[in-house]
Amino acid sequence: MASPAYARSLVNLTKRLKLSPIAGRHVTVTQQKRHESTQTVAQTAATIDRTPGAAQLPSSDTDSAPIDPSKIEEELSKIRLPRAVQATYLDPLRHKTTHGIKMCELQIRSYSVRNLEVFADFAMRAAYYLKLPAKGPKPLPRITERWTVPRSNFVHKKSQENFERVTLRRGIEVFDGHPETVAAWLGFLKKRQYYGVGMKANVWEYGGVEVGQDLDAEAERIAERLSEELHLVGGRGLMNEPGKVTGMLEAEPFKAQWGAHAAMGGIPSVPNADKRVLTKKVQ
């Protein structure tokens, strides 16, 4: 009778077991222990390298002494990871707000919570290194969208299928930051944007009471730089002088563009236009 499938492994294991030694024989089994090497790199290299002239260090009794297994975990716990590696296990650092003036409100959206959390953490760390006081990321309400479409047409109209899409969101607020620094932060996030993640930012800029005078001064400064080019925008400067308009219309390059010099396109204003086609009088 064949043994069931779940018992075959046990049967095979029993066949592989060795029988106990015959009575009267003494079998000694030596258990080898594996010890961690306590030698330094120089000592190990000197031990391996047996060529003439190689540096040979005197061996001591402490080199072959085994390490206590109970102290291994204690020694490993004393090893400090690099700060860059430690930062990945800790929350992002934050600067404290001084005045509480909101400068930017960033909203991060994604369909994947993993991509969303990774990029939100990245944005917080970037704000810290730019010395921008930031708060967040705080979870925002989800956006749930549903669609119902028929699976087929005509008589199968009652067989329909539902689709759903859930958009996850996180919000980050930046306070007391310079507008140029906030713009640099947003530009850096746009350049390093994570796949499957979208962003929407609302930026506030604050000015003094004399904001109107500042805008007028800025407009005058731009007009001085673009005085000649701005005069030609829309042809307004050219249209004020009728003589220039007439000269431009009668210029040969302008006429050549619209075909005035073609075989049948002659006009009286073109020089010698009436002499292009030779005619003879028939008596």
Image (cartoon, grey):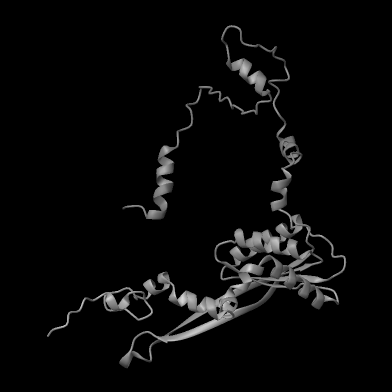
Q: Position of residue 261 (x, y in %)?
A: 32, 73
- Residue 141 lies left or right of residue 257; in this view the side is right
Q: State which quarter of the image contains the C terminus.
A: bottom left
Say which quarter of the image contains residue 166.
bottom right
- The residue shown at (53%, 76%) is 244
Q: Nearer the viewer, residue 242 or 88?
A: 242
Residue 155: which quarter of the image? bottom left
- Relative to the observer, which residue lies in front, 208 or 74? 208
Rendered view: 62 above or below 272: above
Residue 153 falls left or right of residue 176: left
Residue 5 in the image: x percent, y percent? 38, 54
Residue name at image x 41 percent, y 69 percent: 253
Q: Nearer the viewer, residue 280 or 199?
A: 280
Q: Residue at x 23, y 76 (%)?
A: 277
Q: Residue furthest left?
A: 283
Residue 192, quarter of the rendered image: bottom right
Outermost residue on the top side: it is 52
Q: Residue 68 in the image: x percent, y percent?
A: 72, 31
Q: Nearer the viewer, residue 165 or 269?
A: 269
Residue lying at 35% horizontally and 81% vertically, measured from the top left:
268
Q: On screen, 97 above or below 259?
A: above
Where is 118 relative to 111, above or below? above
Horizontal arrangement in the rendering, residue 104 relative to residue 41 (left or right): right
The extreme right residue here reads 98
**What is the tally of numbered marks visible in this picture?**
0
